[in-house]
Amino acid sequence: MTKTPRLTLIAGPTASGKSRLALEMAEKTGAVIINADSQQLYADLRILTARPSLEDEARAEHRLYGVADAAESWSVGRWTRAVMPLLDELAAQGRPALLVGGTGLYFNALTRGLADIPAVPDAVRDAVQADYDLEGEAAFRRRLAEVDPKSAAAITPGDRQRLIRALSVASHTGRSLSDWIADTRPLLTPGSWNGLVLEPDREALYASCDQRVGMMIEQGALDEAKGLVNRKLDHSLPAMKAVGVRELIAHLAGETSLKQAIRQTQQATRNYAKRQLTWFRNQTPDWARA
C-alpha cells in the first residue's frame, strides 16, 4: 500500500481561499499550517496581506507568519533555511503539515531546488550593466550566448535584469548560470509531498480581490500603512512593495483620494492575482487543481 505523504503544498493566487481551505484541513487532521507567502512573513502587514486572523491562528497551529520586521529583507534562501528544520521537526513527530501561500519561488525552491550561486560583487554587476547600456540588448545577448547559450536562449526579449544577472554570474564565477541551476537538487524528497493549486474562475477571483481590499480598509489597512510611513523605511524593502502599500501611502500623502487609492489597490491586486495564475499554470502543470 502506498503511504500518503504527510506534507501538502497548497498554492494559488491571492484571494483564492488558500488560508480558509488550509484551516478546514488542519482542523480535521491536526496539521500545522506553515506560511509560504513572502509578504505574510512581515509582522507589520497583517491586514494589508490578509494574514490569518488571531481567531484563525487560535483554531490551528500556524508557523512562520509575522516573524519578520518590515525593516528586514527575507530572501528565498532565508525562508528555506527557516522552513526546512521546521518540516524536519514535524516529520520526526509524525505530524502532518500544510505549506500554504502564493509565492511561487518558495515552492520551486522546495520541489526543484535552489541554486547555491556565489554572490556577485557590486563592481562586477555594475561593469556588466554598463556594458549592456553601451552595447544594447542584441549585442549583449550574443556575448552572453558565447558563455551561456541556454540562458541566452531562455531569457525573454527585453528582460534586461535577467540578461545582466546571467552574464554577471558567468563573469564572476567562470561558470554559466544555467550550469549552476542544473546542479540544483530539490529540498523535498520526491514522493514526500502532495501539491494542490487553487485555480478559481477568473471573474470570481477578481471579484474576491475587490471585496478583500474593501474589507482591508474597514479593518484598518490605512493605519498599517501609516505605521510604515512613520517608521521612514526604505521603499526598496520587500514589505514596502506589498500590494496596496504604495497606493495607500500616496493617499496618506494627499496625492490621491481614498476612493482612488482603493480603486488602484483593487487593480493592483487583480493584476497580481493574474500573474500568479499564469505562473502556477506554467510552473506546476502536474499538481492537482481545485
Image (tube, rainbow, N blue to C red):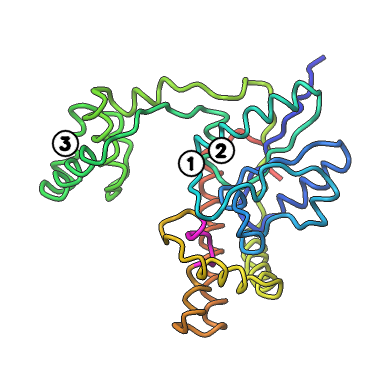
Q: Residue, x 56% and y 82% (percent of image)?
A: 258
* Residue under numbered circle 3: 142
Quadrant of the rendered structure where residue 285 is? Answer: top right
Residue 203 in view of the camera: no
Front in this rendered view, residue 111 or 34: 34
Q: Nearer the viewer, mark 2 or mark 3?
A: 2
Query: Residue 16: x, y in percent?
Result: 68, 55
* Residue under numbered circle 1: 75
Range covered by the magenta-colored residues: 239-245
Seen from this angle, which residue lies furthest front? 231
Instruction: Name the secondary structure under disc 2.
Output: helix
Tag 3 near tag 1, CB within 8 Å = no
Quarter of the figure that contains the N terminus: top right
Q: Nearer the viewer, mark 3 or mark 1?
A: 1
Which amino acid, by three-letter code, is at mark 2?
Trp
Q: Label 2 crowding class (10 Å Cα cut-off): few <14, some 14-19, many 20+?
A: some
Front in this rendered view, residue 254 or 22: 254
Tag 2 near tag 1, CB within 8 Å = yes
Query: Residue 162: x, y in percent?
Result: 31, 42
Which amino acid, by three-letter code, is at mark 3?
Arg
Query: Residue 244: x, y in percent?
Result: 54, 67
Quadrant of the rendered structure where residue 52 is? Answer: bottom right
Quarter of the figure that contains the C terminus: top right
Check if residue 151 falls in the magenta segment: no
* Residue under numbered circle 2: 79
Q: Disc 2 to disc 3, how far (Cα)? A: 35 Å
Q: As drawn, is 195 to the left or to the right of 242? A: right
